[in-house]
Image (cartoon, helix red, strand yellow):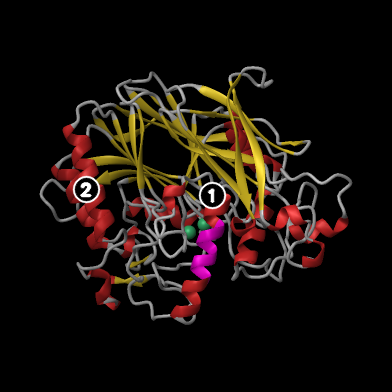
């Protein structure tokens, strides 16, 4: 496994230990601030060889960082030292302040005589500014075994201003016993402990194409289920509730350690039983991003029994709970926060594009059998109805919904709530992106049939892996769906699957 530096391979005694083998990242851009991230790789396996732990690695290491105007680090803008704590997996989170709005910087980390790869990051424009252009890549779902990350190499080559990662950065599973058709394998067990989850992130972050994508621009990240456990819902997962909550805390800690997040994400005094993950980000007056967390606060999937292995598709007729108006996907607090935020966008003529960056498909999928997913918005129809009603009552100037999770590209007209007055009205535009590598088991013929029954679905494709790149200007939003030719090939080329445009003031994607 070339390029892998995770701990099960450390025993092979690298010629020269590189503490920056997991790469660097940046994130959470504001007009005056950005987060710089790295996580140090210790020289030996601390878990297996505690007696050999070099004393320096048992406590806090002082890591230096530099932020510069230029790629050669001749004109240093700021520099400092940050701790890498054993307790936080030797991760480093630097919140650089006092930066200039709307510009690029270069950064790197140093430890002893080791220097990290250099990377680029940028700040958001000043709040009052209307920038001419913003390029955003959004992506999700990168199961290790299912594919190589050529998509990330192509995404980095797009030179985006911002990367939105919408969930399933890791998958908790062990490699399947039947490895037929897999791109690669790993030797890690089903993730349950903090060490397991740390190793899982180390595995993914050892991939050089993913590292390149982190190095090209700041990322704004959120999560879905597989950062913890398939189909978990708030405090409920598989097995006993107490065991699940311990597993979730370990998984959330590893998520924080491995992502370029602000310390304010640690809402629960660092005990990892609560994370402040839903938030807003502005790109001047051009775009306001509402980043949602549809995992932490949701009610259990309809008609799923407590502790069971996962959610199952259900028809409304066989599951009264599905239409229970009390159920929520965001939780009542986040719903209120979101509806207030959309109303504020609507009241502010200055906000050009309101963006819902969330995990999964918002638009309904009506199937011939009447059965529907209970894990996505289809499983929480009353909650979706409340969101659509909020959009219909106080519509922002333009609303675009971004998602992932389903490993399929969906482009949709987001319609006013079914059965409401004006149900034929288009409220927003939806671009649910396919996966970076995770497979879809849905044959394309099924999606073609589904599209015929769902006229609001403009495109539905299951067999491509890739990402979506959006070029956002004051006058229009152009979304390009990019796919890799062969997900099993690390050096695969990529092609444009489709392109859509949303014009300012005219909701609904138009084929371009
Ligand atoms: Fe996924
Ligand atoms: Ca998912």
The magenta span reads: 247-254
Q: Is residue 142 visible?
A: yes
* Residue position for label 2: 339
Residue at x-position 58% and y-position 60%: 171
Q: How many other residues sit within 10 Å of disc 1, few (<14), some (14-19) or many (≥20)? A: many
Frontmost residue, 87 versus 127: 87
Residue 394 vertical placement versus 368 (above, below):
above
Q: Is residue 227 visible?
A: no
Q: Is mark 1 within 8 Å of ligand 1?
A: yes
Q: Is residue 409 left or right of residue 292?
A: right
Horizontal and vertical percent position of residue 353: 30, 32
Q: Which mark is residue 435?
A: 1
Q: Secondary structure at mark 2?
A: helix
- The answer to which image quadrant residue 508 occupies is top left
Horizontal and vertical percent position of residue 67: 59, 27
Residue 177: say if magenta.
no
Q: Is residue 422 left or right of residue 260?
A: left
Q: Is mark 2 within 8 Å of ligand 2?
A: no
């Amino acid at each position: 496994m070339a390029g892998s530096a995770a701990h099960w391979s450390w025993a092979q005694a690298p010629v020269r230990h590189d503490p920056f083998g997991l790469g660097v990242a940046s994130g959470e851009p504001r007009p005056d601030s950005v987060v710089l991230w790295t996580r140090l790789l210790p020289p030996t396996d601390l878990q297996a060889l505690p007696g050999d732990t070099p004393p320096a690695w048992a406590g806090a290491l002082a890591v230096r960082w530099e932020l510069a105007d230029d790629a050669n680090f001749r004109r240093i803008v700021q520099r400092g030292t940050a701790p890498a704590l054993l307790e936080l997996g030797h991760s480093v989170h630097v919140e650089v302040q006092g930066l200039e709005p709307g510009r690029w910087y270069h950064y790197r980390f140093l430890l002893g005589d080791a220097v990290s790869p250099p990377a680029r990051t940028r700040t958001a424009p000043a709040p009052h500014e209307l920038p001419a252009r913003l390029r955003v890549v959004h992506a999700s779902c990168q199961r290790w075994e299912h594919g190589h990350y050529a998509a990330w190499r192509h995404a980095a080559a797009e030179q985006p201003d911002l990367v939105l990662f919408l969930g399933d950065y890791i998958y908790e599973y062990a490699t399947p016993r039947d490895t037929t058709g897999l791109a690669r394998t790993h030797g890690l067990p089903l993730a349950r402990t903090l060490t397991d989850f740390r190793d899982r992130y180390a595995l993914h972050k050892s991939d050089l194409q993913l590292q390149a994508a982190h190095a090209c621009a700041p990322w704004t990240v959120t999560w879905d289920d597989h950062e913890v456990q398939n189909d978990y819902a708030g405090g409920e997962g598989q097995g006993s509730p107490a065991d699940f909550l311990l597993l979730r805390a370990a998984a959330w800690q590893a998520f924080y350690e491995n992502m370029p997040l602000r310390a304010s994400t640690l809402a629960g005094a660092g005990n990892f039983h609560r994370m402040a993950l839903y938030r807003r980000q502005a790109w001047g007056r051009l775009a306001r991003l509402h980043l949602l967390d549809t995992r932490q606060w949701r009610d259990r999937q309809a008609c799923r029994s407590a502790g069971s292995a996962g959610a199952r598709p259900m028809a409304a007729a066989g599951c009264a709970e599905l239409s229970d108006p009390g159920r929520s996907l965001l939780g009542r607090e986040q719903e209120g926060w979101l509806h207030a935020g959309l109303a504020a966008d609507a009241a502010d003529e200055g906000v050009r594009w309101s963006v819902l960056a969330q995990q999964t498909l918002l638009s309904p999928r009506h199937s011939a059998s009447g059965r529907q997913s209970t894990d996505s918005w289809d499983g929480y129809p009353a909650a979706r109805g409340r969101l659509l009603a909020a959009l219909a009552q106080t519509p922002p100037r333009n609303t675009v919904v971004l998602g992932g999770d389903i490993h399929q590209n969906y482009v949709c007209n987001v319609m006013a709530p079914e059965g409401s007055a004006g149900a034929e009205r288009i409220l927003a535009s939806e671009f649910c992106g396919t996966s970076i590598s995770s497979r879809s088991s849905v044959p394309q013929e099924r999606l073609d049939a589904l599209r015929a029954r769902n006229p609001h679905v403009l495109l539905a494709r299951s067999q491509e892996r890739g990402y979506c790149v959006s070029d956002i200007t004051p006058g229009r939003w152009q979304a390009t769906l990019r796919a890799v030719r062969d997900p099993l090939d690390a050096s695969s080329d990529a092609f444009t699957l489709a392109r859509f445009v949303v014009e300012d003031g005219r909701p609904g994607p138009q084929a371009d």
